[in-house]
Structures are given as C-alpha cells and as structure tokens.
Image: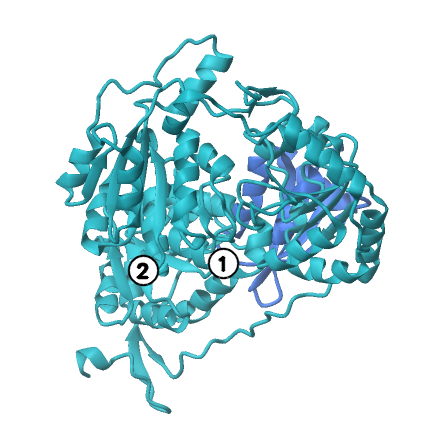
Amino acid sequence: MNNIANTIIELIVNNHPGVMSHITGLFTRQAFNLEGILCGKIEDGSKSRMYLLVNDDDRLEQIIKQIEKLYDVLEITVQKDYDHTIFNRLHEIIMSDR
Amino acid sequence: MLAGAFFTYIEGVIMKYSGAEITIKLLEKEGIDIITGIPGGTNLPLYSALAKSKIRHILARHEQGAGFMSHGMARSTGETAVCFACSGPGATNLLTAIADAKMDSVPIIAITGQVPSSLIGTDAFQEVDIYGITIPITKHNFLIRSAEELLRIIPEAFRIASEGRPGPVLIDIPKDVQLEMIEIESFDRSFEEDDLPIYIDEVEIKKAARMINRSRKPVLYAGGGIILSGAEDMLLNFSHKSSIPVASTLMGLGCFPSSDDMFIGMLGMHGQRYTNYIMREADLILAFGVRFDDRATGKVKEFCPNAKIIHIDIDGAEMNKIKKADIAIQGDIKQAIKQLLPLIEHNDRKEWTETIMDMREKHPISKTTKHDEQLPKAIIKKIGGFAGEDTIITTDVGQHQMWVAQCYPFSKPRTLLTSGGLGTMGFGFPAAIGASLANPGKKVICFSGDGSFLMNIQELSTLYELKLDIKIIIFNNRHLGLVRQQQEYFYGKEYIASQFYCKTDFAKIGEGFGIESYDLEMAENPFLTLEKTIKKEGPVLINIPLAPEENVTPMVAPGCANYEMIGGEINE
C-alpha cells in the first residue's frame, strides 16, 4: 500500500444514520482528505467502531478537538503507530477492480 | 378526554399522547413560556397541541424573524429559547439565525416540521434535508424517528444547547411522528443534571497567577465568555486588585463598566487607537472567554507581539486554534477567575497605568468640530446619556453597529445584543422584539441602518400587534455604508452596488404598519424629538438622515496589523 498516511483515528460512535455525516463534515470543512474509512457495528449494534486513516497535518489537532466535541462520538484514540494490515487488505480489494 | 385536560398527568394512570403533545409538554417542563415561529403543513400537529398549552406563541412574518426573536430572548436572558418552522422553505429560512447562534454561542432550539417519514427522500412537497443542511451550523441536531424518542431527545436538546459553550440545536420532527400516539407513564426527565462548576487544575492556575504577578504590562482581553459565564463581577475585582486594564471584544461589551478607569475600550478592526496601541505594548495578554477572532486580532502574527498569552476558555477546541498560548486552561471562566483571585497580588502598577493614561491622551477618541451634533456618534452618546443602564440595545450590522460599539456607554452584561461572528444584517430588529418579550418593563432600542432594516422590515407587522416598548433608530445614508467605506478606502473609490437610489420614506412605511414614526429630517429640534420619543412607552420608529461620507474610524484594513489604523486621529 502506498502509505503516505501515518495516523489512524479510532472512534467509538453511536450507530445511527447521520453519524458519518457529522464526522466527515468536519473534514470537508477544512478540505482535509480522508484516505480510508473502516466502520462496523459493535456490541448490540447500538454503537460502531470507526477507523479513519488520515495524513499527518497541522490541522489534525483542530479536527481531533472538533471530533471530540461531537455528541455521537463516545471515545477517540489517535494512533500514530497503527497496524498497517487493517487498511492493507482493504486496499487490495479496492485496487483489484472486481 | 376533555380537550383542555390532556396535559393533566394523574399519578399512576397511563395516558395516550401524540408526539406533538409530548413535544409541547416537554417544552413546558423546560420552562418555555414563549415560542416564536410560523406554522405550515408539516408542523400543524405541533401548533394544534400548542393551542391547548399555556405557552404563548409569537407569529413572525418570516422564519428568519422568528429565529432572531429567539436570539433576542436567549441573548438577553441566557436562557434557552425556542422557535418553530415548517419543513422546506420554513426550515431553510431559519438557517441564518441558526448559523448566527453557532457563531455567537447562543442557546436556541429550532424545531422544524418534516414531511412524513414514509415520504422522506422522495422529493416530497416542501421536503428538504434540514438535518443534513444544519450539521455544520448547529452544536448538534436530531431527526426524530418515533414519538418515544422525543422523551429523551427534547430534554437532551436543552442540555446540549446550554451546557459548556452554548449553541443552537435543531430538532426535525416528521409529521407522522407528531401524530403518533403512545402511552406515557411519566414525563420525568431521565437525565441527571450536573450544574456544578468543574474545579480547574490548581497547578495550571498557580502557573498563571505567577505569570500575572510577574508581568509588568498585562492587559485583559475579555470576550463574550465572561457574559455567558456570569463572571462580570469577578472580572471587575480581578482587574481592580492587580490594576489590569480591560479591553473588550464586540461580544464582550457590557462585561465591564465602560465608565471604569480600567476600561480601555473595544479592540480590533474598529477599536480606538489607544486601545490597539496599548495591546501592542502589553507584555501579557489575559485572553478570557475569547476565541481570537480576526476582527479582534487583525493580522495574527502581529497581534500583541511582545506579550505572553494566558488563554482561558470553556471550549478546548479554541486553545491554540489561532494563536499558541503560553498557558492554556480549559474551563469555566468564572470558576477560573475565582481560583486565580486569591493568588493575585495587590498591585497598583503605577508605571503601566501612567503609560495607559498617556496613550489615552495622545490618541483619544477622535474629536470633531462644528457639525458635531449631527454626527451619529454624538447621537448615540446622547441616547446613551438618558436611556438608563438597564436599557437593552440591539444593533444590525454595519457602520451604525460599530459606532454603537465604540460610543454607547455599556455597563451591564446582556445589554448589547449584536450579531458578532456571522455579522447578519437584519438581526437587530427581530432580536429587539425577542428581547422585549423576555424582559417586560425594560426599554429596548434597536440601532439600525437603512440597508439592514430593509432586511427584516416585515416584522413591523409583528411589532404592531405586540405593542412592545421598542425604539427603532434608523441611521439612513441610503447606502450600504460599510461597503461604500471599503470601496472608498480599498477599491480606489470605485463605487458599485453600494448605493440605494430609492429614497425610502421610513416614517411613512412605519405609519403604514401602524407604528408611530418620525423623520428627524423634518424635526425642528432633532435632539428634543429624539429624547421625547425614546422616553415614551411603546413602539416608535425614528429615521435619522446621515451623510453617506460619514465613515467609521479608526479602521484596520482587513489582513493588516491592528496598529496600522486608518483615521480616527485627533482633530481628524
């Protein structure tokens, strides 16, 4: 995988339509590209775990603070040393053009 | 069941309520006694429930008017206010008021009707994705999916709107949800209130106190956060104890008495020369309840270049957003000052105080000559002289707004309601209506310009019905004055699209709506007319003709440093 991105933001969020818009909206507003998104429901389906793959950037601190303020975001962890394989396999599927 | 009796909750008896009835009942429980709005097809069930409630409804003439009326209530009292609109255009007409509330941290709740759930996404009549549209301009928003959800979400919306840094919340309720009947045992609030101020880490407070005690030339840069937190008395003690001068932002005006020796005026783009010069001299900036807005800081790199910064704000996302602080403390400003106060040494700062007095003398508020009395600043000061310190002032946006900010003698918090962050023309008049509704017995004066006033003039019709004690003062230069001024200064006097060729007779228009109106152009003694009419009870409109060449000075050019001011010099 062509890895210029070097930060993963891991979120636990409420699972309902609209949560993704609230989160991605913050990136849209700052013209900050998301390199990858992985999301799936956890527990009884009332929550989701979300991985956002982003490039390191000066604006990241501000975006993270804004994400923390979101009502539907329950937990946030920023990982500089992330497990590459999470996105690698996903990337393979996307690139394989099936 | 009797029509009027459906809100009576009898212990242990399970009753059926519609989503609309639940909504209104919960609003009553939150202490709402006035709702502004306009009905339409998709919120009629809500209105039907409202008809049976003791909540008073104020019918605006445009949803934006309803939105800004809720601003007037919320900004003047600090309590969350509610406005209603129907789906589609009703909802989109609220957008400017919602965005304005986000920028100025105003707790309002907008409740919109939505097309029935089954029609969402079908481009139904008057359908718009108001939930999606308002994501970036609300603190949070909700699309309700069942009547059951209302029980949790309505109280939650009130908590979100007022907690921490206040802001707008939108609740979109599809019509079928408003009509859905469910059984309810109790309307008790399900969440726990947590109003205790959070104690701020003493280590950080001690560090800040040490920095303040060691500084020789500190300046307080106080903003709207002081007012939101109710920290004005604490700020006064703090400033006096250590002889620290206070500069205010536009949103902070009223947080410190303008007559106090320690007050050095509003800073920034239209701040006085001495204010901006003193800020530049400072060796320590105490940024309390502020967000380093560009209109306050000018060119950020050159803002207070010699100063260390202690930034205290309730919103952690404001820390280091614009300017890196030497000490950044997230917390309630009132609590922070309370903890700081005992650690601050008494200090008369003789040298610094003398420097400030010297600066004031060298660069005073511009003095003008002969035609003095006609000038807008003189008129504003005159009104400030007899209006009384409890009078609530609202403004629109433009030159008149800056003149008011520069000259009106504010001495109490929540006496200036102005659109600071978004800068919405048309804000002032509906906000005045809201302020008057929420503060019976207080006089409200709306300073406006002819350009701004035309943007929500329809609410004269609402004012006529309400007969509120509101005085509308229109500074009429038949221009978009601040645009004209910028074209004069920065666009080589190439005037385009800033002049109104229509000579609107505002007095006649006011009378057309049934409002007592005056035009000072005709008045033999304008000041006497002004004083007499303002002191009266009830609504009055006063048109004051003004020369278009009258500019707001000093002015910092956008993008320039605050010390690079145009105009506003002595004997200008």
Q: Label 2 is found on which chain of the structure?
A: B
Query: For the residue labelled by badge 1, is the local secondary structure a helix, a strand or a loop?
Result: helix
Q: How many marks?
A: 2
In the picture of the structure, the residue carrying the numbered disc 2 is: B35
Q: Position of residue A16 (x, y in %)?
A: 50, 57
At horizontal 48% and vertical 11% (from top left) the residue drawn is B491
Q: Position of residue B493 (x, y in %)?
A: 44, 9
Q: Quick one: label 1, few (<14), some, or many (20+) residues within 10 Å?
A: many
Q: Position of residue B255 (x, y in %)?
A: 56, 51
Q: Which mark is residue B161?
A: 1
Measured along the vertical axis of the image, is residue B326 above or below residue B149?
above
Kind of residue sitting beneath label 2: Ile
State the hue of chain A: blue
Q: Label 1 is found on which chain of the structure?
A: B
Measured along the vertical axis of the image, is residue B129 above or below residue B490?
below
Q: Give the position of the N terminus of chain B as an image quadrant.
A: bottom left
Which chain's colour is cyan? B
Kind of residue sitting beneath label 1: Ala
At horizontal 74% and vertical 55% (from top left) the residue drawn is B241
Callout 1–callout 2 Cβ contact below 8 Å = no
Measured along the vertical axis of the image, is residue B204 above or below residue B488?
below
- Do we see residue B121 in this rendering? no
Camera-nearest residue between B124 and B445: B445
